[in-house]
Image: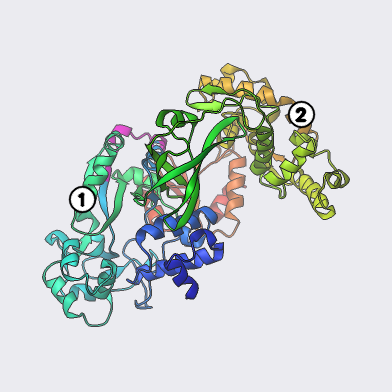
């Protein structure tokens, strides 16, 4: 508890916590919040502690499942009439834009006219989540089971807008104006008061009066003020819509919820264990600071792009000490006057990355003329300063080697520090590293055990099976990230990519002519290195060619299948094998799905959706018998 209090008092900052200490504090803060006694502000929880946890340990259970209910409720849980998941969060308009792109992609998969897609926006209430089926009121619990708190209605609680009972999901809230006028002396947060309405103990006089005055209410989500419009309207009027929703109710609001209204599109987008993919909440970090710039340092990336990094006066922002932030590109430096002595508005994005919003006070700028790594003259490419000395610039060479091992992701030991030491000993290419033995590493200054480990890791990276598209992506060719590499290798064998011409690449779905031109140039630049590394016989799993898929005569060839439920076989292996024989494995039911293969404990909603679309349902045994 002493550690937790030190964190709350900001004696210990988030940067100083170990991963485990951070995770423990997030769980404590979440439990306290859901029990009605928050120990930190929502702002700090979302933008400091939870966001840092997401950055450090993205697979932590707290980020993957519905947050557990706070203490103080009955241990007897009952199934909710409808699953109540959490809501995914976005912290910038750019992230909302990415969500809209996912909507567009899903609509294309079911041939839905994008002009018919409606987006609804509602205020995101900061209350106590519950579900009212007309007879009972339940807490959200773990999203599937909750506690029966029907006693709240029996005590006289009314429904917002004088609506009838049975409106489904919503939140118990208290009017902000009422709380400020009558309750601030006795309750630190509205959350404390809302929790007092729910507890089993008898209500105190203040809670009874708030219910009588209709200041404490159950607000169903479908009764809230809303905005409905197209995706284009949302993008063009985003700030106005957000502000309108934030101001639309007299309750505590901590964001805006956006969701798709088209039922068929909701089914297509589906959900994961924690969120509905067709819904997202926008939460803005309003914690900002005005900070003086001490210096601006150019930093060279593996592609030659020069990024300005602003060194700042140490500033405490959202519980962390910020001393530097990226200036994005030198076009911004020149345009806004980002230089020594300038003053910037600094904030932190949802992933706790310091961000320069704008330059408040300009200063004289220093635009570098030469690369800080190799000294070659820099060139402008639109807003970006570039070093085009790609083969000899130390920062780029080191960056490319580090990128190769990072993308392979089947080795340890080849971080930047190791590669910098190799560079000092005249190692310039990945292929050179694979020629080294333990004695060679030792002569370069590595310890004997480390040298043996580095040799072993090289062997492991060649021996462990990886996808051929991952191997190609590791070379860092412009416009050939992992996704594009996989698409490319569906059209040709890995060793044939160097013979592809502009017309062939441009004809592949997802590749425009300009992209194809950049790929051809990039492939030729890595051809020699590719051939050298190919001598080490990397264990590559080939991507299945589209023509082989199309030519297959298997019963399930080209069919779209979903595997769901607990299988007796390994579901991952079933999916992998299905893909290898030309099956298109899907994750959610839609109108184009051909088969739903079910194991045990299958959600009723998927079964109902399959029946609605006329999709054939097979048991695991039926599927295996047919595929054999």
Asked if disc 2 and disc 1 are in contact, CB closer than 8 Å, the reply is no
**Does residue 568 lie above or below 347 as drawn?**
below
- Report if residue 109 lies within the magenta region: yes
Figure check: 333 above or below 172? above
Numbered disc 1: secondary structure: loop
Instruction: Name the residue tied to disc 1.
Output: 247
Which quadrant would residue 386 be assigned to in this image?
top right
Identify which residue is drawn at 29% across, 34% down: 236
In the image, residue 242 lies in the stretch drawn in magenta: no
Is residue 507 in sight in this rendering? no
Counting residues from the N terminus, which is met first, the one under dot 2 or under dot 1? 1
Q: Position of residue 214 (x, y in %)?
A: 13, 67
- What crowding class fits label 2: few (fewer than 14 Cα within 10 Å), some (14-19), or many (20 or more)? few
Magenta-tinted stretch: 105-120
Q: Is residue 310 left or right of residue 196?
A: right
Q: Residue under circle 2? A: 531
Answer left or right for 393 relative to 381: right
Of the two numbered discs 2 and 1 in the rendering, the one whose residue sits closer to the viewer? 1
Residue closest to the far bottom:
202
């Amino acid at each position: 508890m002493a550690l937790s209090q030190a964190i709350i008092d900001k004696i210990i900052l988030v940067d100083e916590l170990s991963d485990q200490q951070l995770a423990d504090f997030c769980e404590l803060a979440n439990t306290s919040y859901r029990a009605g006694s928050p120990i930190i502000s929502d702002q700090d929880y979302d933008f400091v502690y939870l966001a840092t946890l997401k950055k450090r340990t993205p697979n932590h259970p707290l980020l993957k499942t519905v947050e557990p209910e706070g203490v103080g409720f009955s241990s007897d849980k009952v199934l909710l009439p409808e699953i109540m998941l959490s809501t995914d969060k976005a912290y910038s308009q750019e992230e909302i834009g990415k969500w809209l792109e996912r909507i567009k992609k899903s609509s294309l998969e079911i041939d839905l006219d994008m002009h018919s897609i409606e987006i609804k926006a509602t205020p995101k209430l900061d209350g106590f989540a519950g579900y009212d089926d007309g007879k009972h009121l339940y807490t959200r619990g773990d999203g599937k089971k909750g506690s029966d708190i029907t006693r709240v209605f029996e005590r006289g609680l009314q429904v917002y807008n004088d609506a009838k009972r049975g409106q489904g999901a919503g939140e118990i809230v208290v009017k902000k104006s009422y709380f400020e006028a009558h309750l601030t002396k006795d309750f630190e947060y509205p959350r404390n008061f809302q929790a007092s309405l729910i507890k089993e103990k008898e209500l105190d006089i203040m809670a009874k009066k708030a219910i009588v005055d209709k200041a404490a209410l159950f607000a169903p989500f479908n009764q809230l003020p809303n905005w409905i419009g197209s995706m284009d309207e949302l993008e063009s009027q985003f700030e106005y819509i957000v502000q309108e929703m934030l101001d639309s109710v007299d309750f505590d609001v901590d964001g805006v919820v956006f969701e798709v209204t088209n039922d068929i599109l909701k089914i297509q987008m589906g959900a994961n264990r924690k969120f509905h993919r067709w819904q997202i909440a926008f939460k803005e970090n309003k914690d900002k600071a005005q900070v003086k710039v001490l210096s601006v340092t150019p930093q060279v990336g593996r592609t030659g792009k020069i990024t300005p990094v602003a060194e700042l006066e140490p500033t405490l922002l959202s519980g962390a000490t910020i001393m530097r932030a990226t200036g994005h590109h030198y076009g911004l430096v020149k345009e806004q006057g980002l230089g020594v002595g300038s003053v910037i508005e600094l904030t932190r994005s949802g992933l706790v990355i310091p961000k320069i919003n704008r330059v408040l006070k300009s200063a004289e700028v220093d635009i570098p003329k030469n690369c800080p790594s190799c000294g070659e003259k820099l060139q402008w490419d639109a807003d970006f300063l570039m070093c085009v000395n790609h083969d000899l610039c130390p920062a780029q060479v080191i960056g490319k080697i580090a990128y190769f091992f990072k993308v392979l992701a089947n080795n340890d030991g080849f971080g930047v520090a190791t590669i910098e030491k190799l560079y000092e000993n005249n190692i310039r290419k990945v292929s050179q590293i694979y020629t080294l033995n333990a004695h060679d590493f030792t002569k370069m200054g590595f310890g004997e055990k480390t040298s043996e480990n580095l040799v072993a890791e090289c062997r492991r990276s060649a021996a462990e099976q990886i996808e051929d598209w991952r191997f190609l992506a590791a070379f860092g060719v412009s416009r050939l990230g992992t996704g594009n590499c996989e698409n490319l290798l569906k059209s040709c064998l890995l060793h044939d990519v160097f013979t592809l011409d502009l017309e062939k690449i441009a004809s592949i779905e997802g590749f425009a002519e300009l992209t194809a031109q950049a790929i051809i140039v990039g492939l030729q630049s890595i051809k020699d290195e590719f051939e050298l590394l190919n001598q080490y016989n990397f264990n590559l799993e080939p991507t299945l060619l589209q023509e082989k898929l199309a030519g297959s005569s298997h019963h399930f060839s080209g069919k779209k299948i979903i595997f769901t439920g607990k299988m007796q076989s390994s579901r991952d292996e079933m999916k992998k094998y299905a893909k290898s024989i030309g099956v298109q494995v899907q994750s959610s039911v839609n109108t184009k799905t051909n088969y739903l293969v079910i194991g045990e404990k299958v959600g009723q909603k998927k079964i109902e959706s399959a029946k609605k679309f006329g999709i054939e349902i097979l048991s695991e045994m039926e599927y295996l018998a047919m595929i054999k």
